[in-house]
Amino acid sequence: METILRVTREHAFDYPIVWAADFASLAGHIADLHLSCAKVCVVTDSHVEKLYAESLLSALPEDIHADLFVFPAGEEQKNLDTVNELYYFLIEKKYSRKDILVALGGGVVGDLTGYAAATYLRGIDFIQVPTTLLAQVDSSVGGKTGVDFRQFKNMIGAFHQPRMVYMNMSTLSTLDDVLFSCGMGEVLKTGLIRNAALYRWLDEQRSAIMERRPETLAYMIRECCKVKSGVVERDPKEQGERAILNLGHTIGHAVEKLKDFSLPHGHCVGVGTVAAAWLSVQRGLLEQKDLAWIEEMNRIYGLPNRVEELSAEKVLEATKLDKKAANGRVRFILLDRIGNAVIDDTVTDEEILAAIRYIGDRDSSACAGTRRK
Ligand code: GLY
């Protein structure tokens, strides 16, 4: 079942995304990269370590020395203190510029390891081995790396493309339902911004997807990576088009921060997408029936459409602190139809407040409460 997609931008980067049933072909794919490394440091968190560290370590090429660096699982670990620990580990073990890092885990592991790779000795190579749906369809592809800084999400980072993304599809079988729904938030986003046919397919295939049929999930993830890699090839450093990948993220990140990271990221993005779609309807870009469809799809895939106890003014204030706000002006991603996102810099504070009030409605059954940390 192994398949490969290449992400290529002439003179800048060229790397394969590999879909495999297990880790058996990893060593062969690393050999194909013709790296001259003597050492590889696998970076993972305490949760993924228990599940996959051993099988990944035993699948690495025998002639390369391997180390394992593990940090405690959780978004609150995605900071410069953890990066400092990793730097110190690499220095103590005498990692050179030729050696490589392997990020084994979800978005936190991938972003943090990528940032350490971008900055250690002014940049070393790294490989992404994403084990969550969210990381497989979004964060492992495209070279965005970084960490949170105090209460600011992804505020410190670098663009640093991986040398390979290797997806062992069997890792999805151990994903809990909340993490699976978070990944589905990014999948739905991908259809909404650039691929209406994928969005329709996600509606038709709801049973097979929720049953996590491997061939259905493999097709779905490949389609998402095709969209994402196309956007990244055209605009690797988010000078323009790449911003559409942030549909739902402006209000989503603000909600996430105000709820003190007690709601999962994917759920905040899901509800942020509803706010963006509602705004698109008010602007006359999107039809009311499409907003209803977006909310139905959120319900099907376990994502909330509303959030309890939101102060619209505080959410608005938080959107202005987002790193993507230029001069206090919020950049918004709207939909002019299902399958096409547009960038808009003219959304007013009044419009944003009204959109936040819409998702703050208490009447809905699909409402995200506060989850204990
Ligand atoms: N997750 C958004 C991006 O990679 O640009």
Image (tube, rainbow, N blue to C red):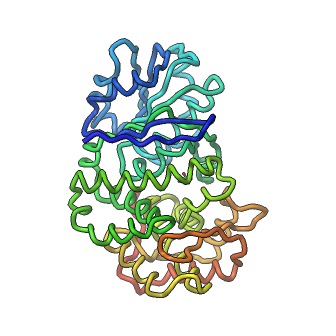
| Between 165 and 44, the one nearer to me in the picture | 165
Quick check: 281 left or right of 69? Answer: right
Residue 329 position (above or below residue 33): below
Q: Position of residue 53 (x, y in %)?
A: 32, 30
Q: Quadrant of the N terminus?
A: top left
Q: Quadrant of the C terminus?
A: bottom left
Q: How many marks?
A: 0
Residue at 69% in and 65% down: 320
Q: Position of residue 357 (x, y in %)?
A: 56, 82
Residue at 34% in and 22% down: 60
Quick check: 34 left or right of 239? Answer: left
Q: Quadrant of residue 24?
A: top left
| Residue at the outermost right position | 327
Q: Quadrant of residue 250?
A: bottom right
Q: Position of residue 17 (x, y in %)?
A: 41, 40
| Between 19 and 364, the one nearer to me in the picture | 19
Q: Position of residue 351 (x, y in %)?
A: 65, 81
Quick check: 192 left or right of 207? Answer: right
Residue 348 visible at all: yes
| Between 372 and 304, the one nearer to me in the picture | 304
Residue 279 position (above or below residue 5): below
Residue at 47% in and 69% down: 192
Q: Quadrant of residue 267?
A: bottom left
Quick check: 121 left or right of 326? Answer: left
Residue 223 position (above or below residue 129): below
Residue 45 visible at all: no
Residue at 57% in and 45% down: 144
